[in-house]
Amino acid sequence: MVLRFSFSRLFPFLRWGRRLDRETVHADALAGLTGAAIVLPQGVAFATIAGMPPEYGLYASMVPAVIAALFGSSWHLVSGPTTAASVVMFSSLSVLAIPGSPDYVSLAITLAFMVGVTQFAMGLFKMGTLVNFISHSVIVGFTAGAALLIVTKQIKVFLGLEIPPQQHLYDSLRYLWDNWSAFHPMVTVVSFITIATVLVSKRRWPKIPGMIVAMIIGSVIASGLNLYFGPERTGIQMVGALPRQLPPLSAPDLSLDVLRQLAPLALAMTLFALTEAVSIARAIALKTGQPIQGNQEFFGQGLSNICGSFFSSYVATGSFNRSGANYEAGARTPLAAIIAGVLLIPIVLVIAPLTAYLPKASVAALLVLVAWRLVDMGQIRLLFAADPKEAGIMGVTFVSTIFFKLEFAILFGVILSLMIYLRRTSRPRIMPRTPDAAARNRKFTSGVTLPECPQLKILRIEDSVYFGSVTHVGEMLRLYREHYPDQKHLLLLTKGVNQVDLAGSQLLLAETQERRKMGGDLYLYRLKDGAAKILKKTGYLDYIGTHNVFGSKHEAISGIFERLDRNICANCSNRIFSECAKVPRADARDRAGREGR
C-alpha cells in the first residue's frame, strides 16, 4: 500500500487514469480537439507579443501542455504561452537581444529552463503550500478582472474595429465609445453567429463539440461573405496559413554570463508563472469542487518548462483562455489537455494551411464567450451577502487586475491574502470556558450566564501562539489577571494550538511566573506534540512542570482541584465541578460543629 501511494504521488496520472472510461475518453477527446483548434491563432499571437517567431507559439503549446497535464494536480488547467507571460518576457529580454533573432530565441529557451528548474525546486521543498494563502475572494476578483481584460482585448476583433494599441483599459473603452459607429457589420454578424451556434448547440445537442461547429460555420459564412462582397467591403480578416514544421530540438545556454543575466528575471517569472497557474487552477476548481495540490502543481509546471526548453518552447504557464475553453468544452480529466497538445502535431503538419479560412472574428467570439463564463456571479453575490470585508478584498483585486499589469495584480492578491491571514492569526480567539452542570459529563461550554469557579479561570485558545500573536495573547492574559484577581489559577485549553514558537514559549513562561506570584499556577490541557516540542527544547516545560500538563479533562480538573483553597471552596455556592461535592459547605460544617458541642 505504501509503495502504491508513493507511485501515485510521483505520477499523479495513475490516480486520474483510473477514472477513464469510454464516455470520459470521448468527452476529453472532443475537448482536446477544441483546445487544439483554439490554440492555433492564439499561439501565433502570443509568440508575436513575446518577440518570438510565430511558430514558437505553437511549439510552446505542445510539449509543455502534455507534461503539465501528466504531472500537475488540476484536471482542467492547460499550460502554454499566455499574454501576460509573453509581455513580461518581451519587456525583459528585448533589452538583451533583438526580438526574433537567434540570440533572442536562445535566451527565451534558456529562461524557460531556468524557470522550470526553480519551479521544480520549490515543489521539492514543499513550498506549494504558499498558494493556500490566496483567499477565495482574491481568486473570484482576479478571475472576473482577467475575464474583462480578455473581452477588452478581443472586442476590436469581435467588432472589426481598428483600435490602436492602448496602455490602459480606460483608454480602450474610451476609444471604443468614441468610435463605436466604425465597426464592420459583417464582422460583427460572424461573431454573433459564432456565439449563437455555441449556445444553441450546447442546449440542443450537448454531446456535439459546439465550439468546433461554431468555428466551421463561422468559416463558411465568412468565406461566403468575402467571396460575394470582397474582403475590402466586409472587413473580415482570416487567421492565415501557419507553417508546417515540428518543434526542432534545442538546448538552453548554461554559460555563466547568461545565467547571471537571466537569474533575476527567472525568479520573477517563476513567482508570476506559478501564481498565475495555481490561481487559474483554483478558479476552475471552484466550479468543479476538485482539490488542488500546490506542490504537485509546482512539479508539473516545473517539468513542463524544463522539458519544453529542449523542444523550442519559451516560458509556459497556465492559460486562462485555454483552461476556460477546456472546461467549457466538457473536459473531465487532464487527458483533454494531453490530446490537445498531441493533436497540434498533425494539425501543424496537415491542417495548419486551412487556418487561412478561419475568421479572426470567430476566434474572438469564442474567447469572449469563455471570458463571460469565467465570471462567477453566484460567488460574487454570496461574498457580498456573507462578508463585506471579503467582498471588499474581491473588489480591490478586481480593480488592480484591470488597471495594473496582470502579473502585479496576481502578486498583489497573494500579498493581500497573506496580510489577511497574518491579521487573523495574530489575533487568535481566546474564550472563557466553564463546565455545564446540566450537560452530560459536564462538557465545557462558552455560556456567559454559567457560573465559574472563583479560583480557576478556564480559557480556550483557538490558534497558534507564535511571534505574530504573542502581543495579542499576552495582552488578553494580562487583562484576565487584572479583572479577575481572585482566579489565581489558569487552565489553558490548547487543543486548537498547533504551534508554539520561541516567543510563544516565553509568553507561557512569563504567564506561569505571574500566576505563581499571585499564589496560583498555569496549567495546560491537551497540549499537542508539535506545540510541546519547542517547550521541551527550551527547558520551559520543566519550569511550567509536566505535572501541570494534562491529557484528559477529568485528570485536569481533579489535579487542579487538589491545589485550590478549601476555605474558599467551603463558602462557594457555584459547585460547578463534581469534585466540589467532596468539600462540605461552610454552613453545614458550622451546624455540625454546634451539634457536636
Image: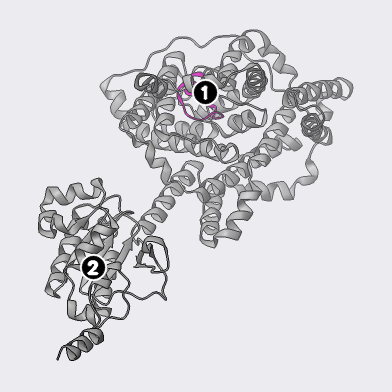
Q: Nearer the viewer, residue 168 or 547?
A: 547
- The C terminus - image quarter: bottom left
Residue at the (78%, 39%) spot, across then down:
183
Q: Residues within 10 Å of mark 1 (few under 14, many from 20)?
A: some
Q: Position of residue 516 (x, y in %)?
A: 13, 70
Please tell me how crowded label 2 is: few (under 14), some (14-19), or many (20+) other residues with Cα within 10 Å. many
In the rendered structure, are the residues bearing label 2 and label 1 in contact, judged by CB atoms less than 8 Å apart? Answer: no
Compared with 64, 395 (above or below) is below
Residue 164 appears in the picture as rendered: no
- 168 and 42: which is toward the camera: 42
Disc on the earlier residue, 2 or 1: 1
- Identify the residue under disc 2: 490
* Relative to 140, residue 6 above or below: above
The amino acid beneath tag 1 is Trp
Q: Which mark is residue 400?
A: none
Q: From the viewer's perspective, is 373 left or right of 431?
A: right
Q: Could you tell me residue 21's position as x and y percent?
A: 62, 17
Residue at point 25%, 56% (across, down):
467
Q: Position of residue 324 (x, y in %)?
A: 61, 33
SS of the residue under disc 2: strand
Q: Residue at x 79, y 29 (%)?
A: 201
Q: Is residue 593 above or below residue 292?
A: below
In the image, which residues are magenta? 65-80
Residue bearing the label numbered 1: 16
Q: Quadrant of the N terminus?
A: top left
